[in-house]
Image (cartoon, rainbow, N blue to C red):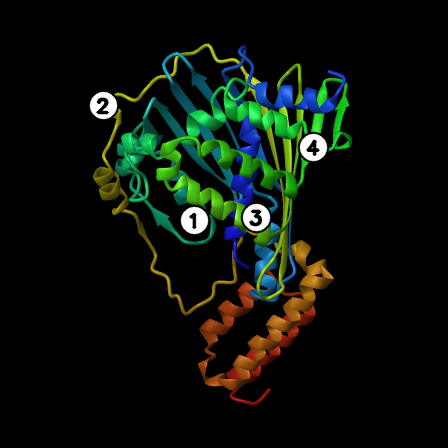
Amino acid sequence: MKMKKYMLGIITGVAIFLLAACGSDPRKEFTNAFLNSKGDEYNAASFEMKIKDLEYDGDEGGAYVKMFASQLKDMSIDGKYAIDDKTEAMEMEITANLFGEKLPFQFVGEKDKYFMSTSFVSGMLDIANSFNYPIELSKSDLNKLKGKYIDIAEAGDTLTSGELDKKANPLKNKTFTNAEDSKMGREMKKLIESFDKKTFTQDKDVVTHTFTKKEIIKMLEKIDEVAKEDKDYKKSGDAKEMKDAIKSLKNDLDKMDIKISINQKTKALDMEMALAATDEDDAKMSIVMTMAVTPQKNSGKIKMPSKKEIISQDELEAILSNITGAATDDSELDLEDDSIDYSDLKDDPEIQKLMDEQLDEMIKKIEANPSSVTEENAKEAREGAKEIFNEEQMKKLNDALDKALKGGAI
């Protein structure tokens, strides 16, 4: 299953959601809240993003893909941000909750200069260790990273300098800044108010609308149409990317719905995005994600890192090169992972059917090459398999391993 179409859908959904961050007819009530939801009284917000549901019915990867999909349901992202319109400064904290561990990211910047905290390194080490991949960094090296930042423009080959980034982003001022006053905002408001009135609802202070795939494509086409009036847009890669995005949404996604609810008083926003697609092997995958944003007020000054707090990319790479850990053998499969609970999967009939198929394949390989089974790798296989196989499956595996160790046929 190709994930590109899902990433495209997610990015598109978040982009439309960001439009919302920046009467008698519920369509007018919705667009007024949609394009003015930031409010002059709010300059910060907290947010939370979760995977509500994830399903995959393909054969590729079998039970392991379904197990991983099950674990993804427990992942979430939360954080907060603040903006100072006078100084054009911004700060953001994001925490990714993955496999029982937390991966923190902190960003701060102003105008065209942005920095990322090195605090993410300790989170990466924790996640690696949670997968029984023991790596570590000395306390002295971790102390060198404490309270430090790196220039985002140096963080990777794909990132550009602030000057180039400014030139390559002609949509910035046209689309998401002062949306209600710009031509882009006016055209978007007109387009949304042309959608079916029955699909807009209002319950007290909350207005709601679910954007369909067809409506989302129309919105992207309108953005492209207005943006083409800017010569920088035509020269940049944005025009081609927009064209490719629209084409992919039309052809690759079976479904894309984005439900947005806005509280006109508190300016709180809730989004639920549902995506579904079928790949070239007719495997189907669907995902439902939720996002909530709660506007806040921030009276504190956004502090930029000092020169002493900024380290270069070379310095960061030198420190990370000191990471040590046990070597791994790619030829071995480590089935034992205490960080993942497979107990619920043992009661899932669909999963168990796939497990039986996986077990049959394992036994066939053991039968075909019994001499490769040793006491050591048989013990490792038993220990790891007991986490994911039920009693009946374990008995079959144990019998196969025992007979292979004795040099007999199964």
Q: Residues within 10 Å of mark 3 (few under 14, many from 20)?
A: many
Q: Quarter of the image holding residue 326?
A: bottom left
Query: In the picture shown, does residue 337 fall above or below 403?
Result: above
Helix or strand or loop: what does disc 4 sit on? Answer: loop
Choose the circle earlier in sequence order: 2 or 4: 4
> Which amino acid does the dot numbered 4 rest on?
Phe
Q: Is residue 123 left or right of residue 191?
A: left
Of callouts 4 and 3, the N-terminal one: 4
Report if residue 119 is visible in the image. no
Q: Earlier in the sequence, mark 3 or mark 2?
A: 3
Q: Position of residue 39 (x, y in %)?
A: 56, 14
Q: Please tell me which residue is depicted at 57% across the width and 48% down the height of the picture.
A: 249
Disc 3 target residue: 249
Can residue 287 be seen in this snapshot? yes
Q: Which residue is mark 2?
A: 307
Of residues 338 and 113, the one drawn nearer to the viewer in this rendering:
113
Bin the neighbour count of mark 4 within 10 Å (Cα to Cα): few under 14, some 14-19, many 20 and up.
some
Marks 1 & 3, CB-CB < 8 Å contact: no
Q: Is there a contact, CB below 8 Å, between mark 3 and mark 2?
A: no
C-alpha distance separating marks 2 and 4: 52 Å
Q: CA distance from mark 3 to mark 2?
A: 44 Å
- Residue with the mark numbered 1: 129
Give how far apart the Cα atoms at labels 4 and 1 are: 50 Å
Q: Whole-percent x and y of residue 365?
A: 53, 80
Image point (68%, 30%), residue name = 194
- Kindly state the secondary structure of the residue where label 2 is placed: helix
**Which residue is tagged 4?**
195
* Front residue of 136 and 314: 314
Question: Which numbered circle lies on residue 178?
Answer: none
